[in-house]
């Protein structure tokens, strides 16, 4: 009487183990991005992937009380390669209300934000690169909050040379401070793709790093990241720019 029961228990255990293995294997082949947007209600939210200069639209869903979830799976070898790499994903409520995070295969990125201003209020967890992206965006938000009042004051006193020069000096000091933050960030995270984003971070038309002046930093970062992520599309473009700069320097010499 006990043997059939023992067999059933063993069979159930094996089936549970098989289901667990299948589930783990499945989750390892996909990216999940979900979250809760305060004041999001039942609005539509869109997901896109950033492929260098191209924005690839992926999906859109209607939130339920601000909650949303996107599940990305791979049907082709090309899609598998894309999901396997840390890539930039953009969530947007409108064209001018977006945030950008980073994710790769096997990660479930969880986002929290306020619908009034996604980029300035969001937090992310569930992936190392996503958390690092939050750090970068939070620092940029702090920079913008300091710079914006200076710009407003500058416009109000555009004809006062003394005040204008004082504002410009404060502005450039803030730029230097944020540039130092980004340089230290890259130094502490040389093998993380978020450092690629740090190198190219910008505000309006301002770039915090210059390809020529910061050539050595660009070269070191490109080599370090390429060793970890060979043939990554972001790094291929970076490598091409690096080779062009090296050629120009050689040609000048």
Image (cartoon, rainbow, N blue to C red):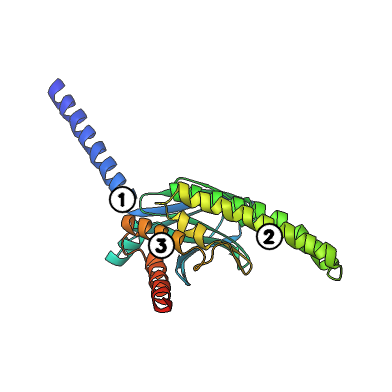
> SS at mark 2?
helix
Query: Residue 150 is drawn in which quadrant?
Result: bottom right
Q: Residues within 10 Å of mark 2 (few under 14, many from 20)?
A: few
From the viewer's perspective, tell me whether residue 51 is left or right of residue 65: left
Q: Is residue 106 left or right of residue 187?
A: left
The residue that label 1 is drawn on is: 26
Q: Foreground: 250 or 215?
A: 250
- As drawn, the label of residue 219 is 3
Quarter of the image where one finds residue 97: bottom right
Q: What separation in Å lies between label 2 and label 1 (alpha carbons)?
A: 50 Å
Neighbour tally class for label 3: few under 14, some 14-19, many 20 plus, Cα within 10 Å: some
Give the spatial CA distance, label 3 vs label 1.
37 Å
Furthest toward the front, the residue is 253
Query: In this orientation, does residue 64 appear?
Result: no
Disc sitting over residue 172 in the figure:
2
Name the one closer to the observer, 163 or 101.
163
- The secondary element bearing badge 3 is classed as helix
In the foreground, 250 or 166: 250
Q: Residue furthest top?
A: 2
Q: Image height check: is 141 above or below 233?
A: above
Query: In what quadrant of the picture does the C terminus appear?
Result: bottom left
The quadrant of the image that shows the N terminus is top left
* Front tag of 3 and 1: 3
């Amino acid at each position: 009487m006990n043997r059939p029961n023992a067999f059933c228990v063993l069979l159930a255990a094996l089936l549970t183990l098989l289901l667990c293995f299948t589930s783990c294997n499945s989750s390892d082949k996909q990216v999940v991005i979900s979250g809760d947007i305060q004041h999001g209600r039942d609005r539509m939210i869109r997901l896109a992937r950033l492929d260098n200069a191209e924005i690839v639209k992926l999906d859109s869903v209607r939130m339920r009380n601000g909650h949303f979830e996107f599940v990305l799976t791979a049907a082709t070898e090309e899609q598998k390669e894309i999901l396997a790499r840390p890539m930039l994903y953009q969530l947007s409520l409108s064209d001018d209300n977006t945030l950008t995070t980073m994710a790769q295969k096997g990660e479930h990125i969880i986002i929290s934000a306020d619908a009034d201003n996604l980029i300035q209020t969001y937090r992310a967890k569930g992936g190392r690169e996503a958390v690092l992206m939050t750090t970068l965006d939070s620092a940029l938000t702090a920079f913008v909050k300091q710079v914006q009042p200076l710009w407003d004051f500058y416009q109000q006193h555009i004809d006062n040379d003394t005040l204008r020069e004082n504002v410009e000096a404060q502005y450039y000091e803030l730029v230097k401070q944020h540039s130092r933050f980004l340089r230290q960030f890259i130094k502490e995270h040389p093998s993380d793709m978020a450092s690629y984003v740090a190198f190219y971070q910008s505000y309006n038309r301002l770039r915090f790093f210059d390809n020529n002046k910061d050539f050595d930093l660009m070269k070191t970062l490109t080599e370090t990241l390429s060793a970890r992520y060979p043939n990554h599309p972001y790094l291929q473009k970076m490598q091409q720019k690096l080779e062009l700069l090296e050629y120009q320097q050689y040609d000048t010499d």
